[in-house]
Each structure stands twice: as C-alpha cells, then as structure tokens.
Image (cartoon, grey):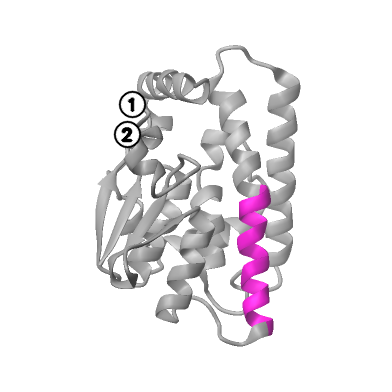
Amino acid sequence: MIDFYTAPTPNGHKVSCTLEAMELEYETHVVNLMENEQKKPEFLAISPNGRIPAIVDRDADNLPIFESGAIMIYLAEKTGKLMPTDLHEKAKVLEWVMFQIGGVGPMMGQANVFFRYFPEKIQPAIDRYQNEGRRLFEVLDDHLAKQEWLAKDYSIADIANWCWVRTYKWSGISIEGLNHLERWMKAMYGQPGMSAGLEVPIKMESLLDDDKKAKEFAKNAEKMVKK
C-alpha cells in the first residue's frame, strides 16, 4: 500500500496517473495548498521542500519519497512497468522525463504565474515563458513526427510530459500547427489509467469554460504563489 499526498496540479497528476496505470493500491491524502498544509511539520517530514506530490511506501519500511519525477522513476523500477530494462532504452525514457522536469514544467508553471495569477501583467515575463513553452512544444512535435511515443515504447516519459502539456490553454501557449503533438495528446487520453488519474484527488471542471470560476481560482492561486 502506498500513501499518496497530493493536490489537483499537473505534478500531482503525474503520480496519480502513474499509480493508476500501474494498477497500484494507494490511499490518497489531500494536501490543501491554499491553507498552506504543505508547510506543516508532519508533511515536511515526508517532503522537506514543502511541495506535493509525495508518497510513503508502506511495503518498503514506510519509505518516504518526494519530487514527482523521483516518485515516477521509483514506481517504474518497483513494478517493472512503463520503464525498459535495456540501459540504452532506459536512458531515452529518462531524457524525456528530465526534459519535462527541467523545461516543460518550469516554463509552463511560470507562464501560469505571470499570465494567470499575478494581478500585475508584466508582459516581458509573460512573453518569455509562453515563448519558451512554445519552443519546447515544438521540440516535442518534431520528435513525435518520427515516432509514436517519446521513447521507443509508451513510458513514464509520456505521462510526465502529457500531464503538463495538456494544460496548454491555461498557460496561454498555442499548439497551432503542432499536429504531431496534438495526435500524441489525444492518444494519451486513451491510455489505461489516464482519465482516472486526472480525477485524483478531485475531478477538476474545466476552468476555461467558466470565466467566473477561472478568475476565482486565479485569485486564490495568487495568494499561494505570493507566500
């Protein structure tokens, strides 16, 4: 059994989708980011950086693991699923996992902050992160023009990138003309565990369809990012 500490964010969904895809038994513990629960001592004992997601593997002497990428790699190694055993093929999976961790996630995250959350619209910052996000999308699109998945076979690399890329509208980043990226995104929705994983810890309604809800969410998020 795995204790899973999370909130409805792309990084949280990276792990929930992985858990669902691997058909692992887990118990969800919702961390209320708006109430700063991620900074409480009991959570910091599991995740020293005070960020979600985090897990505790009860079957491994209550091993705590934080950072979404580390959790995904651990689960893949633990189960032997969604990660090749061949060293060269594994390196290719890890390349694209790190691409998301070091590029896609940070750029889209900052695009969200400046485009959606800060009341002061600092256009050079918005342009910087949206343009870099678009550039990274183009890298993905070029790669996916050559093959079906990011690595040789479907893997945690696809889950890691998809959980962020699928939120492109919220970040204000265009995918116009990126046909291979769009094809891949649609295919991801059909993979086992993805739809279920997106509903953990709660099913999020599309904020883009309700301007009032979108503004309310952004206002609450503004308080969080300024803490």
Does 91 appear in magenta?
Answer: yes
Q: Is residue 93 above or below residue 131?
A: below
Q: Which residue is mark 2?
A: 32
Q: Which residues are magenta?
A: 88-103
Image-based side of 21 in relation to 161, left or right: left
Q: Residue at x 52, y 72 (%)?
A: 155
Q: Is residue 167 above or below residue 86?
A: above
Q: Residues within 10 Å of mark 1 (few under 14, many from 20)?
A: few
Q: Is residue 195 above or below residue 156?
A: above
Q: Residue at x 54, y 64 (%)?
A: 158
* Res 172 seen here: no
* Helix, strand or loop status at disc 1: loop
Image-based side of 48 in relation to 130, left or right: left
Image-based side of 111 in relation to 197, left or right: right
Q: Nearer the viewer, residue 176 or 195?
A: 195
Task: Where is residue 197? Give x, y as percent.
Answer: 34, 57
Question: In the rendered structure, which amino acid carries the disc numbered 2?
Answer: Asn
Q: Which residue is mark 1?
A: 35
Image-based side of 196 in relation to 173, left or right: left
Question: In the rendered structure, which amino acid carries the disc numbered 1?
Answer: Glu
Q: Residue at x 37, y 69 (%)?
A: 21
Q: Is residue 227 above or below residue 108?
A: above
Task: From the image, give the main secondary structure of the stretch colored magenta.
Answer: helix
Q: Nearer the viewer, residue 118 or 136?
A: 118
Q: What distance separates the C-alpha of mark 2 from that of mark 1?
A: 5 Å
Q: Is there a contact, CB below 8 Å, between mark 2 and mark 1? A: yes
Task: Where is residue 58? Give x, y as percent.
Answer: 28, 66
Q: Which quadrant does the N terminus fall into?
A: bottom left
Q: Residue furthest bottom?
A: 86
Does 94 appear in magenta?
Answer: yes
